[in-house]
Image (cartoon, rainbow, N blue to C red):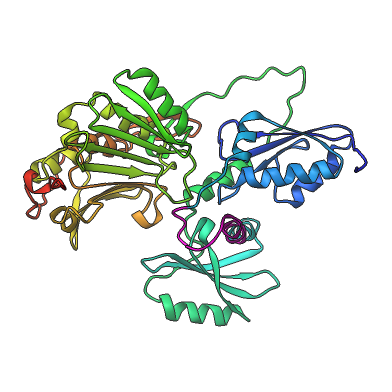
């Protein structure tokens, strides 16, 4: 048995960002536990509180390892119930993009990506340039007092693709491969990277005992920039307040919400893989037919955007389940909030795009004429779909009113209570002058039943 030390550690999920884990320290030898956690990648917020924020969403796994290590070093460890359940829940990796790896091997790959992220975050790896080649993000950088590298991928899938002896060699090879696409410096941070940075940068300072504090004043931010919040709680709230929807859970990984007419369904995957869609909403002609339309999005979508979508389908009518006919009129109806806000549509190859520096919508006319090619609609926040902070994709027959409610969340004057101030803009009345290509009729879009 190890000699005990006067250090008591409480592990719990982060109070506002449940993906992350916090550690609170007590005792005269708490500094020993602090050093142990820091060496394992935890970030100190104060002398007695730390946070574990990772890009691979594996915080419970690594927190469990940290708890075991501290116990072996003689500290007393307590784990909050919610975190304990997360630690003991078996994670599935059925959609991991690298087949053939078991969970332990996947965690090794993700941890290597985590180390690259931390090296960039802490300034040990300086990124010179980046480029998107249509499939993945590429970058070139140099380790301080070390070699130069080419990187490929983002977040938990980022890897070292090549190693060079000097920055000059690395830059020359990168220019040859990405000359027409490269941009200086690092790529804009992904949503997960921004979440991690925010969690690590919130320093908590103790207030003097005699000081009275005033709660921070709530301010507004655009809806598309709001925090993701707790999606599981959001679905539970939806089910509690809409008695025409019923909860059905066929397995631990997902919860289904099914309307009483059984032709509208919602699926929420509770622990999606990074980059995997966690929500799927779908409509059916009958309870036993193929689905007519669906839309899907990840757990990075802000809570008020998800709430808007749930409110949009709350009535659950048969007409909503059947979707909207795909023609110029329905597309115009879906995009009305943007055209009324002055957004202009442009034709980009086979697509029509409504875009601004903070988000946009893309309508794929080729996919619209070939409904088996999904998705037809892309709705995103961020500079582009490839660098989106969040993205919703939808099939051809998705109801126009639902799409309209979603795209309205992109307009700057649609606001949400949050900590960051925002400026509102006046909405002008302008309509885009774009002729839509021929699209199939509603009857042509309906999937044929299989026998």
Residue at the (31%, 29%) spot, across then down: 258
Quarter occupied by the N terminus: top right
Q: Is residue 49 left or right of residue 356?
A: right
x and y percent of residue 11 in the render? 70, 35
Q: How many marks?
A: 0
Q: Is residue 366 left or right of residue 94?
A: left
Locate residue 210: give its quadrant: top right
Q: Quadrant of residue 337?
A: top left
* x, y percent for residue 228: 46, 37
Camera-nearest residue between 252 and 234: 252
Question: Is 437 located above or below residue 19 in the figure?
Answer: below
Give the extent of the magenta segment. Answer: 94-112
- Spot the residue most to the right: 3
Where, by quadrant of the figure, is residue 6 drawn? top right
The residue lying toward the viewer, choosing from 286 and 54, is: 286
> Does the magenta-highlighted stretch encompass residue 96?
yes
Q: Was residue 45 drawn as part of the magenta stretch in this picture?
A: no
- Locate residue 366 relative to residue 73 in the image: left or right: left
Residue 357, x across and y down, in percent:
34, 50
Q: Is residue 202 visible?
A: no
Residue occupying the point 36% across, 34% down: 305
Q: Nearer the viewer, residue 210 or 206?
A: 206
In the orientation shown, which residue stands out farthest toward the front? 451
Residue 205 visible in image? yes
Q: Position of residue 407 (x, y in %)?
A: 27, 39
């Amino acid at each position: 048995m190890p000699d005990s030390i006067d250090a008591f550690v409480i592990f719990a999920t982060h109070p506002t960002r449940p993906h992350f884990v916090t550690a609170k320290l007590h005792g005269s030898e708490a500094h020993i536990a602090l050093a142990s956690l820091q060496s394992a990648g935890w970030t100190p917020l104060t002398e007695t509180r730390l946070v574990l924020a990772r890009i691979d969403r594996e915080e419970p796994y690594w927190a469990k390892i940290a708890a075991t290590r501290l116990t072996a070093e003689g500290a007393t460890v307590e784990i909050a119930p919610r975190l304990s359940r997360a630690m003991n829940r078996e994670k599935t990796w059925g959609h991991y993009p690298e087949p053939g790896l078991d969970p332990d091997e996947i965690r090794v790959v993700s941890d290597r990506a985590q180390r690259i992220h931390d090296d960039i975050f802490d300034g040990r790896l300086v990124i010179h340039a980046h480029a998107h080649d249509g499939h993945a993000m590429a970058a070139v950088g140099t380790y301080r007092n070390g070699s130069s590298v080419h990187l490929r991928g983002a977040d938990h899938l980022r890897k070292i693709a090549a190693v060079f002896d000097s920055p000059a060699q690395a830059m020359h090879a990168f220019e040859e491969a990405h000359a027409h696409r490269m941009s200086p410096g690092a790529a804009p941070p992904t949503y997960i990277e921004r979440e991690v940075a925010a969690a690590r940068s919130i320093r908590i300072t103790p207030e003097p005992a005699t000081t009275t504090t005033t709660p921070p004043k709530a301010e507004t931010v655009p809806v598309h920039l709001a925090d993701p919040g707790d999606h599981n709680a959001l679905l539970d709230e939806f089910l509690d307040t809409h008695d025409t929807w019923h909860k059905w859970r066929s397995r631990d990984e997902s919860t289904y919400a099914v309307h009483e007419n059984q032709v509208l369904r919602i699926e929420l995957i509770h622990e999606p893989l990074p980059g995997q869609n966690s929500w799927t909403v779908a409509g059916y002609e009958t309870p036993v037919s193929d689905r007519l339309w669906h839309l899907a999005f990840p757990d990075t979508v802000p809570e008020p955007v998800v709430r808007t979508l749930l409110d949009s389908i709350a009535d659950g009518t048969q007409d909503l389940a059947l979707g909207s006919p795909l023609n110029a009129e329905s597309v115009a109806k879906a995009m009305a909030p943007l055209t009324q806000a002055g957004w202009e549509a442009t034709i980009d190859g086979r697509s029509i795009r409504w875009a601004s520096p903070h988000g946009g919508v893309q309508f794929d006319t080729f996919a619209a004429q070939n409904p088996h090619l999904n998705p037809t609609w892309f709705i995103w926040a961020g500079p582009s779909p490839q660098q989106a902070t969040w993205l919703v994709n939808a099939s051809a027959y998705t109801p126009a009113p639902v799409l309209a409610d979603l795209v309205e969340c992109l307009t700057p004057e649609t606001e949400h209570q949050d900590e960051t101030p925002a400026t509102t803009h006046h909405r002008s009345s302008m309509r885009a002058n774009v002729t839509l290509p021929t699209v199939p009729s509603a009857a042509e879009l309906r999937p044929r039943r299989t026998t």
